[in-house]
DNA sequence: GCGACGGTAGACCGATCGGTCTAATCGTGC
DNA sequence: GCACGATTAGACCGATCGGTCTACCGTCGC
């Protein structure tokens, strides 16, 4: 049994991904999580905004884990990148295409807020840095790794949006063929 | 002097891009546009949803125009793609990075709605098709044009998000170097 | 002058928004 | 078993949400 705080952040994150920060009311989060209002403001004194930050943090950690899981067993960069795209496509399908980038849907659609802005930037940078680390570990030069990690990040970010628009995860599976031809 | 209908759609589009569909209230749109409530529901019987569709349509047309303006004077595909990225970066800077993709911010963040879903898909396809047309006109094979247009679309979509997160349009200007090295 | 009518103006509606507050309950150390 | 802080429970708040409705205004044809 998860503690209330985690349960709230998890459920909030899922809902934010589906409908965006402003598209979800705290009442809906509370009901879905089966938690009364008092608990929310006990665990997250700043309410919805705190919840968004916590949810984004969880999602970010999860994404880093997926990156590691994809690249760790890989024999080269292309192999790891392909695995990552396929893993994300599978994740996309499980959620029936109803889900956006867990971080941008939460923080970018949120209020004009310096904290959100900073958190978003740091999370994205962390993802790219992690991909870059794996690229270097797998034999790429730092310059190659810079370009490849950014290329992959942009393709996934854009591809996810297109996949949502078309309700079809094939875009994500086609990403490796599209961006690895350069290498 | 623009007619009321157009003024509303224009202003609504701008606000949706900044804060997402759910992040803007009709009262705010009305106030910004200097239009009373009665006029909204006269011109857009379905209210906010109609407004979003109209705004997305205007934004889509505008984007097609920018694509044409970029590729028409180009001597080859790389040249046109580069111009497009720079034009978008400039547009991004004018709005001070406060603005999202005019279409996805409006339709993807909107309510779970088959009409929105379909419109979004068609607009994205229209953009890619337009880029593809120019690529072919500039001498690419259909297969090349398919890959290049999708690659450019994804890079712009992802790059725009990253640019917003970092509040820096340089990502957009770096796109050509990142995705054209393949050719 | 006078209806007809497309359009404007904004008061008003119930529902929901995010957030506060007090009371009850739980868990643990004594 | 008792006291006390941590946590839960939900009634309640003013503000705002999207939307409806009636009254009014301007400009036509006549």
Image: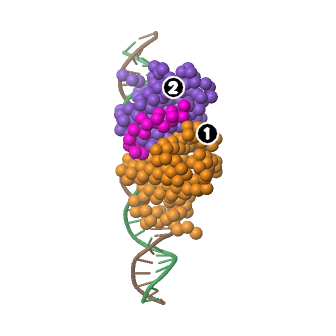
Chain colours: A orange, B purple, C green, D brown
Q: Tell me: residue A142, above or below residue A69.
A: above
Q: Which residue is mark 1?
A: A177
> Would you name the residue on which mark 2 appears?
B77
User: Which element carries disc 2, helix, strand or loop?
Assistant: helix
Please give the name of the residue rendered at 44% of the width and 50% of the height, measured from the top-left corner: A125
Q: Nearer the viewer, residue A28 or A47?
A: A47
Q: Residue at x 62, y 25 (%)?
A: B142
Q: Chain of mark 2?
A: B
Q: Can residue B39 be seen from the camera position used here?
A: no
The quarter of the picture where residue B145 lies is top right
Residue C22 relative to residue B116: left or right = left
Q: Quadrant of residue B169?
A: top left
Q: Is residue A57 left or right of residue C8?
A: right
Magenta segment, which residues? Answer: B164-183
> Where does the image place residue B85, in percent across and percent down from the top left?
44, 32
Which residue is depicted at the point 47% across and 33% down?
B176
Query: Is A64 rendered above or below residue A178?
Result: below
Main SS of the magenta part reads helix
Which one is in front, B133 or A30?
B133
Discs 1, 2 touching: Cβ within 8 Å: no
């Amino acid at each position: 049994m998860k503690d209330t705080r985690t349960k709230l952040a998890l459920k909030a994150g899922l809902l934010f991904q589906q409908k965006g920060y402003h598209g979800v009311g705290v009442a809906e989060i509370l009901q879905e999580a089966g938690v009364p209002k008092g608990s929310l403001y006990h665990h997250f004194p700043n309410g919805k905004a705190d919840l968004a930050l916590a949810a984004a943090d969880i999602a970010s950690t999860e994404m880093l884990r997926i990156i590691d899981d994809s690249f760790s067993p890989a024999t080269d960069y292309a192999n790891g990148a392909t695995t990552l795209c396929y893993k994300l496509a599978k994740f996309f399908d499980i959620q029936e295409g109803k889900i956006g980038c867990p971080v941008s849907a939460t923080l970018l659609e949120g209020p004009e807020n310096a904290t959100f802005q900073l958190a978003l930037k740091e999370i994205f940078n962390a993802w790219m840095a992690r991909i870059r680390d794996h690229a270097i570990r797998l034999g790429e030069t730092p310059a190659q790794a810079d370009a490849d990690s950014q290329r992959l990040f942009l393709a996934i970010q854009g591809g996810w949006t297109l996949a949502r628009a078309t309700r079809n995860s094939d875009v994500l599976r086609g990403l490796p063929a599209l961006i690895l031809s350069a290498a």
